[in-house]
Image (tube, rainbow, N blue to C red):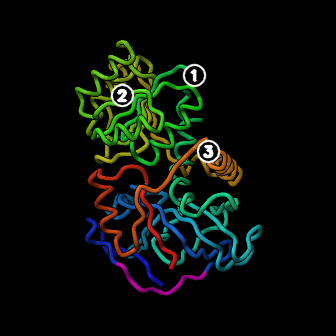
Amino acid sequence: MRAVQITQYGGPEQLSLNSVAIPKPARGEVLVKIAYAGINFMDVYTRRGAYAGASPYASELPLTLGMEGSGWVEALGEDVDGLKVGDRVVFCLSRGSYADFAVVSASKLVLLPDAIGLDLAATAYFQGLTAHYLAHDTSRLRPGDTCLIYSASGGVAQNLIQMLKHREIRIIASANSIEKCDSALAAGADYASLDDPQNLLDAVAQYTKGQGVDVLFDSVGPALFDTSLKILRKKGLFIHYGANSGAIGAIDPMQLANAGSLYFVRPRLNDHISTRTELVERAQWLFKFWATGQLSSSPQRIYELSDISAAHQALETRQSIGKSIVRIMT
């Protein structure tokens, strides 16, 4: 089968499309024929070596990239119940989807309703699950509260904007171009600003009448960290769920105190779908909202497996709007 692999960490030039043996599912595992794979920053972090040390996502080289996908059950390992060959499924947080086939733990697979396309599932499932726990669990937002969402044209942010609008939250969005700001407004944001520090400070001060936002959803990291501390109201919540500009590093707790007794949290999706029940409940919520049109999503671009380097470059250089996916099925 075809598989995009890395043998050493580095830039997009390390990505190699290889021919390798089709893996076999072990006990409790399923072989999935991949239809589409999602492209996300976890793939970039993996390629760079960010997960090479102690991490739930650590893996030895060489490895096949791709942390999410959709497709069909091809074969079952021993002791797998509730699935059969031919079932349409979706998964995330399981490496190996940049390939024709991937072995996935049965516990991570969710059956797709007939009304949900495999392309939609690959586009919005991973980011939808992330946005769901951020909106409903971590943020503690109440109707009428105000939040700021960085990188607001990204996949998580686009889902987050739509979910928070259903909860009557006031949303300020920021991005690095007018086109991306327009995308955030189209998704439902109330106000949009370019993400340079002065524009952000002015926008938040104007929109909140100098009070600051209740919650900040940060997927940027160190490039805007100092600005972020100035944007939050006293006792505001700083949710750092991604670091597109690199790792923040050590934080002096007195920075949070001096900025107004701020709360800082770094959540991770894996801990919010740690049980089968929690995963299925969040997935079913997404399926319902997709089917009824209360959440909408479509891939910004569909790449072929041979073009994966270009896909990574577009994501890293912040050229992408929304979510892109890779077509695997032949």
* Residue to which mark 2 is pinned: 253
Spatial CA distance of label 2 from label 1 is: 30 Å
Q: Which is more N-terminal, label 3 or label 1?
A: 1
Crowd class of label 2 (few under 14; some 14 to 19; many from 20; radius 10 Å): few
Amino acid residing under circle 1: Pro
Q: Is residue 285 visible?
A: yes
| Residue closest to the eye, 103 or 310 | 310
Q: Which is more N-terminal, label 1 or label 2?
A: 1
Position of residue 65 measured from the top left corner of the image (x, y, whole percent) = 42, 69
Left-right relation of 50 to 266: left
Position of residue 201 measured from the top left corner of the image (x, y, whole percent) = 28, 23
Spatial CA distance of label 1 from label 3 is: 22 Å
Q: Which residue is rendered at x = 33% and y = 62% of the image?
A: 312
Crowd class of label 3 (few under 14; some 14 to 19; many from 20; radius 10 Å): few
* Disc 1, SS: loop
Residues marked 1 and 3 touching at CB (< 8 Å): no
Outermost residue, right side: 81
**Prevalent SS, magenta region:** loop
Q: Is residue 16 above or below residue 146?
A: below
Q: Nearer the viewer, mark 2 or mark 3?
A: 3
Crowd class of label 1 (few under 14; some 14 to 19; many from 20; radius 10 Å): few
Q: Magenta stretch?
A: 17-24
Amino acid residing under circle 2: Pro
Please say whether residue 133 is one of the residues in the magenta stretch: no
* Residue to which mark 3 is pinned: 293
Q: Which mark is residue 143?
A: 1
Q: Is residue 248 above or below residue 92?
A: above
Q: Quadrant of residue 301?
A: bottom left
| Residue closest to the eye, 317 or 180 | 180
